[in-house]
Amino acid sequence: MNQPNKVQEYEKVVDLLEHFLKKYQNLGRNAIETSIVSLLKNNISGLFFVGFYEVIDENYLEVGPYQSTILATPRIEKGKGQCGQCWAEGKVQIQEDVKVCQNYIACDNETQSEIVIPVIKNGVVQSVLDIDSEHLSRFDEVDSKYLQRIVEYLI
Ligand code: SME
């Protein structure tokens, strides 16, 4: 996908989200996460899975709102897979080819590439946004920049 189209898609999502959050103020975390998932899955091209994983205790993430045709792995240990690694490091993870990734938890046979964004409040990871694509090398710095901006609406 060319970069101008990608930027255009994310700008649309940011506009829709801002408009939505202005209209419905003081929404809870679950409502905002669910709305972000829906906006991304339905407006950004080439996404197979979009979902949040929530930190539920010191050791585990548990699946939160998501959209896909698969059943997501429900719990992920800290440090395990790209989601657990994102939580442990507090840093964006981009895998251009999940088949060669040593620390990857497969939930399906379609996913080729993945990006995971940490949601950090007061220096603590609250949840992670996990996005999978059926295309190789689907994610880059543009996705990272916009997705970090989008999850800031949760903070
Ligand atoms: N691939 C993720 C697991 C979650 S599923 O993709 C929905 C990981 O490696 O943590």
Image (cartoon, rainbow, N blue to C red):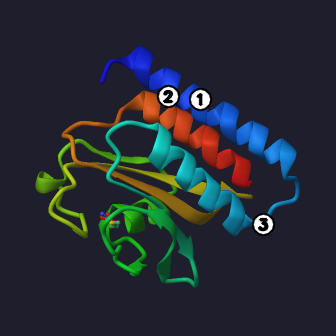
Residue at disc 3, secondary structure: loop
- Label 2 sits on a secondary structure element that is helix
Query: Is 155 left, or right, of 44 in this rendering?
Result: right
Nearest the eye: 20 or 153: 20
Q: Residue at x 59, y 26 (%)?
A: 11
> Which mark is nearer the camera, 3 or 1?
1
C-alpha span from label 2 to label 3: 25 Å
Residue 12 - label: 1
Checking the image for residue 92, the label placed there is none
Q: Is residue 125 left or right of residue 53?
A: right
The quadrant of the image that shows the N terminus is top left
Pointer 1 local density, CA inside 10 Å: few below 14, some 14–19, many at least 20: some
Mark 2 is surrounded, within 10 Å at the Cα level, by few (under 14), some (14 to 19) or many (20 or more) other residues, namely some
Residue 28: assigned label: 3
What residue sits right under mark 2 in the picture?
9
| Amino acid found under the numbered disc labelled 1 | Lys
Residue at (39% x, 18% y) in the render = 3
Task: Give me the residue at 68% from left, 46% from top.
Answer: 152
Is residue 146 depicted above or below 69 in this figure?
above
Who comes first in sequence, dot 2 or dot 3?
2
Q: CA distance from mark 3 to mark 1?
A: 23 Å
Q: Nearer the viewer, residue 38 or 53?
A: 38
What amino acid is labelled 3 in the image? Gly
Mark 3 burial class by Cα count in 10 Å: few <14, some 14-19, many 20+: few
Q: Position of residue 20 (x, y in %)?
A: 76, 44
Q: Nearer the viewer, residue 97 or 112?
A: 112
Give the mark nearest the N terminus, 3 or 1.
1
Query: Where does the image place residue 148, in percent across and percent down from the top left?
Result: 57, 42
